């Protein structure tokens, strides 16, 4: 559609859409579907394919750590036969593509955004408050802009990686695919979140020598006293504890943390530092510096494991306390699951890569936000969005889907696309009614 001017004529060289959504992951598609529910049009721009990160930018065996029940979209709950399981990331991508097709969402794949312009003379009465310039030279004017690229957009690798000998293969987790994609030899996995532990688990099962450089993380049980973790989360309202990161602050962290580790590839038992050590993974401290083929480490293996074990025990204790308080007749579980600290031992402050036969390093060191396509005046000094509650932008008509809210990762969660999408859609719907003077009610279902 050509862009409408203030005088009612059309400027045909620029396309127009009431709302432009950048990113066709679960958050972007959730916004588009929620707008559709209210009869509002949008166009979704995706640099790759729908569900690009889940389907094409993660390792082959990735499991969705938040569980199958969390895979829901506006108007569609999880409809599979394993609600307590952990589906592969590629299945999530497939489900999202099928959803977008079924809902006939207007998604333009392989359409990268070069930059977004906010016309300096735009007023709240104008139809065009944003111009989204595409890499192919096209532009789309819009009254509303929803940025749904999330906070996990830019892979982070520590600066010390540059000081490691060039003979050692290095790659970030978003480029790792499977054990066969690495050269022969032992592998050092850096980072003990969901990515680091799942990849270390896969590598040791493939017969590789594996070293895991630990870092702060949480660990929760996969199953306890006859119920899945996510069932207990629902019964005792543990969702906020699950997504709380404890970092404080009002905006996205430079490197966003992850959810507690719970999913395990074989679908049985738990995944944590104790189980990995029991399978032969060598736990080493957090990497602090590098000198060629030597990594200088913090001597913190035991401290990190103990902190992880405390997070595990806390959720077990919370569930037990709730069961007693409500008198639920559920089976006891002896011994209770936990992080087996007897398997954990100090490593020291140096790791000799050559002596240990380590030929590859997989950096599972997280992601950070990348909002460089936006104008500088809507970003803070660190390049992160100026926002409220992880959704409302610094200027009218600008929204974000998939940003954390203070110290909570709740808005980032997969299933949060429903609440995020409908909140944004209602705001856009109200804006339309108030601006046009429509007699329609601003109260939506």
Image (cartoon, rainbow, N blue to C red):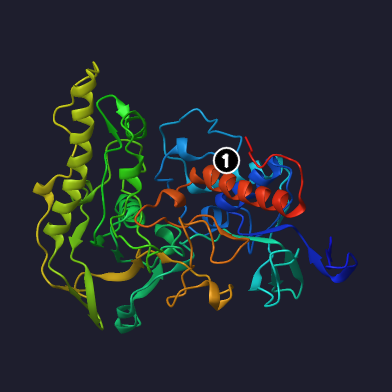
Q: Residue at horizontal 89%, vertical 64%? A: 8
Q: Is residue 262 visible?
A: no
Q: Position of residue 65 (x, y in %)?
A: 39, 45
Q: Position of residue 282 (x, y in %)?
A: 19, 59
**Which residue lies most toward the right here?**
9
Q: Which quarter of the rendering shows the N terminus?
A: bottom right
Q: Nearer the viewer, residue 248 or 136?
A: 248
Quadrant in the rendering for residue 378: bottom right
Q: Which quarter of the rendering shows the C terminus?
A: top right
Say which residue label 1 marks: 73
Q: Position of residue 329 (x, y in %)?
A: 23, 15
**For the residue labelled by badge 1, is the local secondary structure a helix, a strand or a loop?**
loop
Q: Is residue 132 visible?
A: yes
In the visual, does 441 lie left or right of 375?
Answer: right
In the visual, does 269 lie left or right of 410?
Answer: left
Label 1: how many residues lie within 10 Å, few (<14), some (14-19) or many (20+)? many
Quadrant in the rendering for residue 149: bottom right
Q: Nearer the viewer, residue 267 or 49?
A: 49
In the rendered view, would you say 301 is above or below 30?
below
Q: How many marks?
A: 1
**Which residue lies most toward the top here?**
329
In the rendered view, would you say 265 is above or below 298?
above
In the rendered view, would you say 118 is above or below 30?
below
Q: Residue at horizontal 55%, vertical 33%? A: 77
């Amino acid at each position: 559609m050509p862009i409408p001017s203030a005088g009612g004529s059309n400027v045909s060289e620029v396309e127009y859409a009431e709302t432009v959504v950048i990113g066709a992951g679960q958050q972007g598609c959730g916004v588009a579907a929620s707008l559709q529910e209210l009869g509002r049009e949008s166009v979704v721009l995706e640099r790759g394919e729908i569900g690009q990160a889940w389907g094409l930018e993660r390792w082959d065996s990735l499991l969705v750590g938040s569980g199958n029940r969390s895979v829901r979209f506006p108007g569609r709950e999880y409809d599979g036969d394993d609600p307590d399981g952990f589906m592969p990331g590629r299945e999530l991508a497939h489900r999202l593509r099928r959803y977008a097709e079924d809902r006939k969402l207007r998604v333009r794949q392989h359409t990268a955004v070069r930059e977004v312009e906010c016309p300096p003379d735009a007023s709240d009465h104008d139809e065009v408050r944003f111009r989204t310039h595409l890499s192919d030279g096209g532009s789309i004017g819009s009254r509303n802009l929803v940025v749904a690229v999330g906070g996990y957009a830019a892979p982070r690798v520590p600066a010390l990686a540059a000081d490691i000998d060039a003979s050692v293969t290095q790659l970030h987790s978003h480029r790792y695919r499977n054990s066969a994609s690495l050269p022969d030899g032992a592998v050092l996995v850096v980072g003990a979140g969901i990515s680091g532990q799942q990849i270390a688990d896969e590598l040791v099962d493939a017969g590789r020598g594996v070293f895991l450089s630990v870092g702060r993380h949480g660990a929760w049980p996969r199953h306890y006293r006859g119920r899945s973790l996510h069932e207990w989360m629902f019964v005792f309202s543990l969702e906020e504890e699950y997504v709380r990161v404890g970092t404080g602050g009002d905006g996205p962290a430079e490197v966003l943390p992850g959810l507690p580790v719970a999913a395990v590839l074989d679908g049985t038992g738990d995944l944590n530092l104790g189980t990995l050590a029991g399978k032969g993974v060598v736990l080493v401290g957090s990497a602090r510096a590098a000198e060629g083929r030597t990594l200088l480490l913090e001597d913190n293996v035991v401290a990190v494991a103990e902190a992880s074990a405390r997070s595990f025990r806390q959720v077990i204790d919370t569930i037990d306390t709730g069961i007693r308080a409500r008198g639920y007749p559920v089976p006891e579980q002896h011994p209770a699951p936990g992080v087996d600290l007897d398997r954990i031992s100090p490593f020291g402050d140096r790791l000799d890569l050559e002596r240990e036969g380590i030929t590859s390093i997989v950096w599972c060191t997280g992601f950070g936000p990348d909002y460089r396509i936006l104008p500088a005046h809507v970003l803070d000094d660190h390049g992160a969005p100026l926002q409220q509650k992880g959704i409302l932008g610094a200027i009218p008509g600008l929204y974000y889907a998939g940003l954390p809210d203070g110290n909570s990762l709740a808005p980032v969660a997969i299933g949060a696309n429903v609440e995020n999408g409908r909140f944004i859609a209602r705001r856009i719907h109200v804006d339309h009614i108030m601006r046009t003077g429509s007699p329609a009610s601003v109260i939506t279902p």
